[in-house]
Amino acid sequence: MTADVAVSVWVLAGVVALSDAGRRLLLRASADCGRAAYAVELVSTFQLCCCTHELKLLSEVGGVEPRLALTLTYLASVVHGFTFRGAIGNPTGALEHAYRERLTRGCALRRIACQFAAAAAARAAMRMVWGVGLSALHVRHKDLGYQCTSPIRASVLTATAVEMMCAFAVQSAITHTRSVEEKYRVHAVAAVITTVVYAGGRMTGAVFNPAVAFSTQFPCGGHSFLEYCVVYWLGPLLGMMISVVLLDRLVPLLGTKPEPLIGFREDDKKKKKRKKL
């Protein structure tokens, strides 16, 4: 078990190192043609999905203890936060940027296309890595035909609600920490992600990212494609929308003090004049 964990950690480190090198090369190559943002989005989402595949394998097939799994989740989230170089890595996040007009609609759609392309590539790439047989865990997973079972352990409605709440919590944390210095913001968001994984992981895997779910959960048996779409696509989308509406619309309205009516203002002025006399 210790050897399996050590190999998986080296795989995670290798994925991050290769992805970072790829980001740097693509940034240099595409800086003049204006495609740098899409190149970074593609590589960063690939890194995110590959790491999630390995962590999922450790947790579900390797049977590592939850404390270690959560620690690795936190560390991986921190590394992603510091290495993404402006990439979003989440389709619902791209839609939220389009809503706030940080991205045009076309740019958001192209980023989402890059994210799903990277998700499909990461699925194929990790099967190649596991096929090498670097650890006993990888060999066992290969012998099983890379099969996985659905992590949904509740009704579709309940699972959708869980993914919705997970996405709401993460999106709210991202929104509230945008003005915070990066070295603190990354750790704060990583802590929220780890908490969400701890709270909802037993019911749905706590993915809250449609692209990552497409890469890691959709190939698993146990539920239909439509059910996965409802849980892992509709749930996070609703969570993001509720976060935006609640924090941008309702909270500011509740925080404003109602102004007194004009008639009451005039009565107050008359009372003040009488007191002076």
Image (cartoon, grey):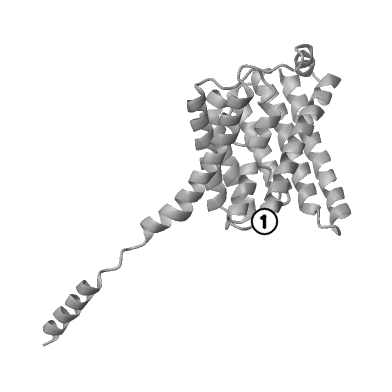
The residue nearer to you, when weighing 181 against 261, is: 261
In this picture, residue 218 sits left or right of residue 159: right
Residue drawn at 70 percent across, 42 percent down? 79
In this picture, residue 24 sits left or right of residue 215: right
Callout count = 1
The vertical placement of 100 against 84, above or below, is below
In this picture, residue 257 sits left or right of residue 9: left
Which percent across, then down, holds residue 106?
70, 52
Residue at far top of view? 143
Q: Which residue is mark 1?
A: 104
The vertical placement of 202 against 250, above or below, is above
Say few, some or many: other residues with alpha carbon within 10 Å of mark 1 (under 14 / 14 to 19 / 20 or more): some
Residue 223 appears in which quarter of the rendering? top right
The vertical placement of 229 against 267, above or below, is above
Residue drawn at 67 percent across, 20 percent down? 220
- Can you see residue 195? no
The vertical placement of 58 against 78, above or below, is above
In this picture, residue 267 sits left or right of residue 53: left
Does dot 1 land on a helix, a strand or a loop? Answer: loop
The residue nearer to you, when weighing 231 against 203, is: 231
- Can you see residue 253? yes
Residue drawn at 61 percent across, 56 percent down? 181
Kind of residue sitting beneath label 1: Thr
Which percent across, then down, holds residue 4?
74, 20
Which percent across, then down, holds residue 196?
54, 35
The residue nearer to you, when weighing 185 against 88, is: 88
